[in-house]
């Protein structure tokens, strides 16, 4: 009795504030941090797997990993990086930032939001646990019938990806509902910050494309465990059907991973150039254009699979057309920094790195869309290089830019600039050193997903491996910076960057309900240098509005 | 000041154009051109390389220039002059890329039609992929072999299929690739234009031995090809050739056949080891059993189910006998 | 809710009429099916009839006709996308 | 840009000004994604129906399923009548209609089980052919949705009995209705594509 009472007393006592990050919590800011930290852990896991891959490829011959082990490591590297790192970390930013940016108290469905997060740790553990029962080994694309023949871990993999997809659909419903119904007074759609536009475009894609992947994965899982014949040729099944279902999601998934990243870049450039974003509407509309076009290009991954040859050309055209809205974004960003007053804080460096690297990924995408060239480079290291320039050089750079940019907002502390610069330069050199040689080695004839290669490719592979190890090492200054600064960094102002978007108009970190009083918006988000709406001075926290 | 910036623009344009031109004509990034198709694909590739190199230099140059030129002066806390956009500029950088894309698209379609146009006097070669080897059939001459030989200058139509999972038939020197998908036959046309030996690789992940699913295409003069075909029709009698042609080499290391596959157990010294594997089974019977019924005994440390089960029907009795004798002697 | 209350008798009658219509269309479909006509003739008819049924349910039972247009957009866009996807999946 | 603190209603929602309710927006978005989920399964079914037709499709009993279709259409009518009931402030009518909906839903599932069993007797199973695989997967997932709908109807009914819904506040009933009608629409499409065409 006595013990019960003391237990009850202990339960009533408020828990230390950091404990909420380990518990069910419906505050979008807590959930955002949960997302970012959890997914960063998976980034480290995926990165370690990449180090194994690059070690194996340091020299020709099968030395460190045999064929099966290599396939498992490579498959899980891809799956972890895409499904457990890039997609959910961007959802994490969305969770933390979107309600603040639109002047809301929280997301529209806080409990759904928490549920969406809590699907991720079990899904991640499921994917990694598959190593104990024979991990997935059919690549992240899980092409049938190879994935039907793979060991039991492939089933766990499928279940894990279904869970992650469900989580992603949940956050898409939540984002769209929040953005449609909970904007602050005066925040019309043409005053929405571009990051919010990016999240809108991404959510539309998640909502329409992810369920198709879920359906496809269910078919694969049923083929594996229930004896269905969907993809088994002997029973009349057609392996190409899986490629349709898979790529109908997985090509848009690239835009799911890139559009919010582009949104982050669009936030960073105006702030650190002290200039309005150039061509706001065109950037916003190009996000939507990319989303819509992105749903129509999936079969360009299937030019070499025996699809109807007449249908290839429309897919080539739609794939190439995506270059146009993408170009609009890049030119607009350049025009934004043109004649600006640039400050090279770490977020700005990563944003410029984003442009320079994403550009390479984008331009090589045109080669891949051109069918005659694709018939040579498809499924080679050229593709590996292309997708890493888009997703690592692009999305991950933007994620780093966002992490540094919003670090003071989220933690209430300032990170260390010098470590940030070190991190950037290691990352920049590492990215180019790791992935540029892959273009060459792919053109020369090295297929992707091989544990062994022709000795003539050795030098290029060694360069790539050295770049890869540099990338691995580049995480260390970041981690040190993030941890130490959170504990001991200088206290940050509410608005250390003198930014104009709403998330900076409240204290760092924001109070539980985000704003003392909900703001009323009277101007666009990037009106730097305008006479009337002066940039707010750095204000001591906590503060809401002026 | 104005003149200087004008000069700068002219200079930059020159650098970009020259850079694009060099990229388009001088950089040689592709392997040997082994087919007429390769010539056309490379021409398209060089054109794209030129265009993209121009855009690349333009954007990276602007980025670098901005980083150097527009750096904030120390102590300058003011905002920059607000420019929200410029309709003419925005329309321009939408339309120009769109025009370039249309041009590239049209040109690509032309190349595509050229390289896939059916030719007279085409020779059909059936390609069958299986874990982890290729098999080639010349239906007109009723020849099945593990080696791909082609006469130079004669158009070839590959009819590609698979017996297990998806593979992808790729000859980098031909700039040609097509998936071998079970349950369907895909077509690929090329005309070899260079005599020589070029690697054939599997480009689609097909299992643990994917990296080793490599063979060669031998392009030779028509009379040499005809002789080879006649000889092959008689059937291979050289044991090392049987070992290679039936795909054993893809998975098993054997010095005498020059192979170094790692998917299955190494076969060096198998002649002495074979008798000890299963009590009561002679070395010869063990080897026969391992070839015709691989699941009967699986060497510890290796997975069952990877080795094809159909050697009994694919190998003639003579070939099986030659192969077993060959292995016994190792 | 958001929708202003209307005269109740009219509304239930409306639902009843819609239901009657749905039942009649289903009856027609079953009758057509039992006639064993050529596929080329009846198949397009079936598609039109079922599209009509689905539209009736969405417009009246799900109130898309009187609710904000935004809900219709949310629902119809995926349906269009699905049609495109399914058709392309058949031919590819 | 300035953000003056104002005295407007604190939980002002721009969407509310547009006449949008966030629960309904969320529900419709969810239904939109459900369209695409069934789209994936349907695409697989159609792919095999067109490219790989099998004679087993002839064993389907259109008459039985026609009755089942009518049952489900009727259930949509009872749902909407229930909603009309609470909208005019008559919870008893609503509860009655919800009960009828549950009954009709169970009847539909019963019909489906009967159909499945008779197909099993003809040797058509999940693993007998691509027709069996795609037929049972597609109709099975629809049946699963009906089952979820029945559970949702039951929980709505229980809340209705406890008097949780009123003339002014019945968004829960409306959301359940949207889901149920959606499942009905899916069936209308499946009935045409699987059985009629």
Image (cartoon, rainbow, N blue to C red):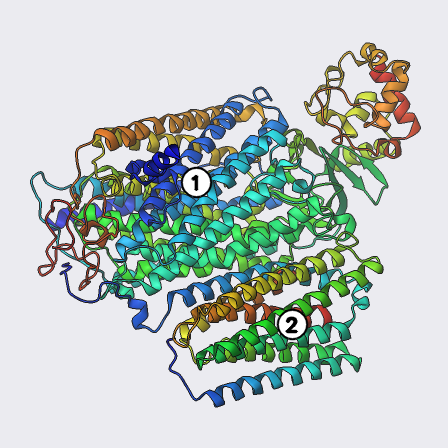
Residue at image coords 50%, 25%: A52
Residue D166 sits above or below residue A304 on the image: below
How many tags in the picture? 2
**Of residues A249 and A4, the one drawn nearer to the viewer in this rendering:** A4
Q: Chain of mark 2?
A: D
CB contact under 8 Å: marks 1 and 2? no
**Residue A193, percent from left and from top:** 27, 57
- Quadrant, the N terminus of chain A: top left
* Residue placed under numbered mark 2 in the picture: D104
The foreground one among B129 and A117 is A117
- In 3D space, how far apart are the residues under numbered discs 1 and 2 (Cα atoms)? 45 Å
The residue that mark 1 highlights is A85
Check the image and report above or below for D71 versus A373: below
> Residue shown at 40%/53% (left/top)?
A111
Q: Nearer the viewer, mark 1 or mark 2?
A: 2
Q: Which mark is residue A313?
A: none
Residue A156 position within the rendered picture, expressed as x and y whole percent measured from the top left? 60, 40
């Amino acid at each position: 009795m006595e013990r019960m009472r003391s237990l009850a007393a202990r339960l009533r006592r408020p828990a230390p504030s950091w404990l909420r990050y380990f518990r069910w919590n419906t505050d979008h800011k807590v959930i955002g941090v949960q997302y970012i930290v959890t997914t960063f852990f998976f980034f480290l896991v995926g990165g370690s797997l990449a180090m194994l891959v690059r070690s194996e490829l340091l020299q020709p011959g099968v030395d460190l990993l045999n064929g099966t082990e290599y396939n498992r490591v490579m498959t899980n590297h891809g799956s972890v990086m895409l499904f457990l790192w890039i997609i959910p970390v961007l959802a994490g930013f969305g969770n933390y930032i979107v309600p603040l940016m639109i002047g809301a108290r929280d997301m529209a469905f806080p409990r759904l939001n928490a549920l969406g997060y809590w699907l991720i740790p079990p899904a991640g553990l499921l994917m990694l646990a598959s190593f104990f029962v024979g991990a997935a080994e059919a690549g992240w694309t899980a092409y049938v019938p190879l994935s039907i023949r793979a060991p039991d871990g492939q089933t766990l993999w499928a279940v894990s990806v279904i869970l992650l997809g469900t989580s992603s659909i949940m956050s898409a419903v939540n984002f769209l509902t929040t953005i449609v119904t909970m904007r602050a007074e005066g925040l019309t759609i043409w005053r929405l910050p571009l990051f919010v536009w990016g999240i809108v475009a991404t959510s539309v894609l998640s909502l329409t494309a992810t369920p198709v992947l879920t359906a496809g994965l269910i078919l694969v899982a049923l083929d594996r465990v229930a004896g269905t014949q969907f993809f088994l040729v002997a029973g009349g099944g057609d392996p190409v059907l899986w490629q349709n279902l898979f790529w109908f999601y997985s090509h848009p998934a690239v835009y799911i991973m890139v559009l919010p990243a582009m949104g982050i870049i669009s936030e960073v450039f105006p702030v650190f150039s002290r200039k309005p974003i150039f061509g706001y509407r065109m950037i916003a509309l190009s996000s939507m254009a990319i989303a819509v076009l992105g749903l129509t290009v999936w079969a360009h991954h299937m030019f070499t699979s025996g699809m109807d040859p007449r249908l290839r050309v429309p897919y080539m055209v739609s794939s190439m057309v995506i270059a146009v809205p993408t170009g609009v974004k890049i030119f607009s960003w350049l025009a934004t920094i043109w004649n600006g007053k640039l400050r090279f804080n770490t977020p700005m460096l990563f944003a410029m790195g984003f442009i320079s690297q994403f550009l390479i990924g984008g331009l090589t995408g045109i080669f891949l869309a051109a069918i005659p060239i694709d018939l040579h480079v498809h499924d080679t290291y050229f593709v590996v290089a292309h997708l890493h320039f888009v997703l690592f050089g692009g999305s991950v750079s933007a994620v780093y830019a966002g992490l540094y940019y919003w670090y003071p907002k989220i933690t209430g502390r300032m990170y260390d600039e010098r470590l940030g610069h070190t991190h950037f330069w290691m990352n920049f050199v590492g990215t180019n050193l790791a992935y540029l040689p892959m273009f060459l080695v792919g053109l020369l004839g090295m297929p992707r997903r091989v544990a062994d290669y022709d000795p003539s490719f050795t030098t290029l592979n060694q360069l790539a491996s050295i770049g890869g190890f540099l990338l691995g090492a580049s995480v260390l200054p970041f981690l040190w910076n993030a941890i130490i600064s959170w504990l001991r960094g200088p206290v940050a102002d509410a608005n250390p960057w003198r930014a104009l978007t709403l998330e900076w108009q409240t204290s760092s970190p924001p109070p539980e309900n985000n704003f003392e009083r909900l703001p009323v918006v009277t101007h666009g988000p990037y009106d730097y240098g305008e006479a009337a709406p002066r940039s707010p001075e750095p204000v001591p926290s906590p503060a809401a509005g002026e | 000041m104005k003149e200087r910036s004008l000069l700068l623009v002219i200079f930059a344009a020159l650098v970009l154009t020259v850079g694009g031109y060099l990229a388009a004509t001088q950089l040689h990034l592709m392997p040997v051109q082994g087919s007429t198709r390769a010539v056309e694909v490379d021409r398209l590739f060089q054109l794209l390389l030129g265009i993209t190199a121009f855009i690349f230099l333009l954007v990276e140059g602007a980025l670098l220039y901005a980083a150097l030129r527009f750096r904030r002066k120390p102590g300058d806390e003011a905002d920059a002059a607000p420019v929200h956009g410029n309709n003419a500029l925005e329309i321009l950088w939408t339309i120009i890329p769109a025009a370039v894309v249309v041009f590239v698209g049209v040109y690509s379609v032309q190349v595509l039609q050229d390289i896939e146009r059916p030719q007279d006097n085409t020779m059909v070669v059936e390609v069958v992929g299986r874990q982890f080897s290729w098999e080639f059939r010349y239906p007109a001459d009723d020849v099945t072999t593990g080696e791909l030989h082609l006469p130079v200058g004669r158009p070839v139509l590959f009819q590609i299929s698979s017996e297990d999972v998806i593979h992808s038939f790729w000859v980098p020197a031909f700039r040609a690739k097509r998936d071998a998908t079970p349950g369907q036959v895909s077509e690929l046309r090329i005309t070899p234009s260079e005599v020589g030996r070029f690697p054939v690789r599997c480009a689609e992940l097909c299992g643990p031995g994917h990296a080793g699913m490599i063979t060669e295409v031998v392009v030779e003069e028509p009379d040499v090809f005809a002789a080879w075909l006649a000889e092959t029709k008689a059937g291979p009698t050289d044991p090392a050739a049987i070992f290679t042609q039936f795909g054993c080499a893809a998975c098993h290391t054997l010095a005498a056949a020059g192979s170094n596959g790692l998917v299955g157990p190494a076969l060096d010294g198998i002649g002495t080891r074979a008798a000890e594997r299963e009590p009561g089974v002679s070395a010869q019977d063990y080897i026969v059993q391992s070839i015709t019924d691989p699941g009967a005994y699986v060497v510890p440390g290796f997975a069952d189910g990877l080795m094809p089960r159909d050697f009994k029907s694919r190998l003639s009795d003579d070939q099986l006998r030659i192969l077993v004798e060959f292995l016994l002697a190792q | 809710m958001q929708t202003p209350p209307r005269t109740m008798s009219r509304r239930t009658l409306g639902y009843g009429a819609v239901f009657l219509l749905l039942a009649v269309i289903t009856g027609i479909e079953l009758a057509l099916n039992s006639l064993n006509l050529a596929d080329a003739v009846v198949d397009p008819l079936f598609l039109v009839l079922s599209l009509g049924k689905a539209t009736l349910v969405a417009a009246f039972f799900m109130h898309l006709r009187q609710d904000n247009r935004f809900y219709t957009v949310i629902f119809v866009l995926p349906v269009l996308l699905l049609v495109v996807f399914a058709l392309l999946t058949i031919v590819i | 840009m300035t953000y003056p603190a104002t005295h407007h209603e604190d939980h002002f929602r721009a969407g509310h000004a547009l006449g949008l309710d966030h629960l309904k927006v969320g529900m419709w978005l969810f239904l939109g994604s459900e369209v695409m989920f069934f789209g994936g399964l349907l695409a697989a079914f159609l792919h095999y129906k067109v490219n790989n037709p099998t004679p087993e499709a002839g064993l389907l009993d259109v008459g039985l399923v026609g009755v089942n279709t009518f049952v489900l259409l009727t259930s949509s009518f009872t749902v909407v009548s229930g909603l009309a009931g609470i909208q005019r402030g008559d919870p008893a009518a609503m509860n009655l209609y919800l009960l009828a909906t549950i009954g009709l839903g169970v009847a539909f599932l019963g019909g489906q089980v009967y159909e499945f069993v008779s197909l099993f007797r003809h040797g058509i199973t999940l693993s007998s052919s691509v027709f069996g695989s795609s037929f049972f997967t597609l109709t099975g997932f629809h049946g699963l949705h009906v089952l979820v709908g029945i559970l949702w109807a039951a929980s709505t009914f229980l809340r209705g009995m406890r008097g949780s819904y009123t003339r002014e506040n019945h968004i829960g009933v409306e959301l359940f209705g949207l889901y149920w009608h959606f499942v009905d629409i899916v069936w209308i499409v499946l009935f045409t594509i699987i059985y009629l065409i």
